[in-house]
Amino acid sequence: MIKKLIAYEIQNSWRVFFLIYAVLLLIAALVKAKLISLPDFFYVHLMFIDLFLTIGILTNRFWQSIYGQEANFLLTVPANTAQLMASKAINSLLWLLVSFVVMGMTFMWQGNPLGKLMLNYITLSSIIITGLMILSFLYTAISLAHHPFIQKDYLGMTVLFFIVLYSIFSLLQNTTEGLIPYTIRISMEGITVNSAPGNMMIADNFTIVVNSAVWSIFMIFVNFTFTGYMIKRKLIVP
């Protein structure tokens, strides 16, 4: 059943993503043919635009399929909430990965060095973990906003819940990381261990802070699990 759920998610989202990829390829072709010239900072902005567009599309898919018109169909299929959330997680992971691989390849085709940096495992891991973490908080916020006690302004409540949840997460992360005496970093130069605290980020040397990455993965699991519980409890999914 989970394979069918993943196929259903892909079937209902690939057209929008392929439109984005077509625009990226068109820009790349125009630059390659020297018909247009783009400043270097544009590529960095384009990378973040792609991330936010991907997150936005996946968030809308979750909203429509669980709490929108598609819910009448999706929530009646013979699948439990664990399978539903697993299909959402895998679909989110897939499109985050594909989106940035496609962008990295288009940058490389144009001869932009940012493309090669985007396609190394350090950068892709950071982007995917960050994207999944944001999505997991958005999914949880959407589910909380659709609690029976909240009768209107679902969008506004979703934004509010997301800000509150992410603020709590940041506070807990900073507090727990402050209790750990050592920080493990993975970069293209190798693995280093030191006593300086740090957050997972894509820095100039494209470094992953393992402590923060592990914490983020844990929160992704917690959010997906809690969202599944909310769906099962409030929408009575079998």
Image (spheres, rainbow, N blue to C red):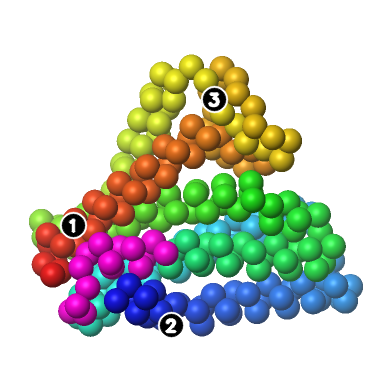
- Tag on residue 183? 3
Q: Is residue 36 above or below residue 148?
A: below
Classed neighbour count for the residue bearing mark 1: other residues with Cα under 10 Å, few (<14), some (14–19), many (≥20)? some
Position of 129 compared to 48: left or right? left
Classed neighbour count for the residue bearing mark 3: other residues with Cα under 10 Å, few (<14), some (14–19), many (≥20)? some
Relative to the observer, which residue lies in front, 28 or 216?
Answer: 216
The residues bearing labels 3 and 1 have C-alpha atoms spaced at a distance of: 35 Å
Residue 187 at x, y percent in the picture: 67, 38
Residue 12 at x, y percent in the picture: 41, 81
**Residue 153 in sight from this viewpoint:** no
**Magenta segment:** 76-90
User: Which quadrant would the N terminus be assigned to in this image?
Assistant: bottom left
Q: Residue at the location (74% across, 73% down)?
A: 27
Residue bearing the label numbered 1: 230
Q: Amino acid at mark 2?
A: Gln
Tell me which label, 3 or 1, sits earlier in the chain.
Answer: 3
Q: Residue at the location (76% across, 63% down)?
A: 107
Residue bearing the label numbered 2: 11
What kind of element bears circle 3?
strand
The residues bearing labels 2 and 1 have C-alpha atoms spaced at a distance of: 25 Å
Residue 238 at x, y percent in the picture: 13, 70
What kind of element bears circle 1?
helix
What kind of element bears circle 2?
helix
Q: Residue at the location (73% across, 78% down)?
A: 26
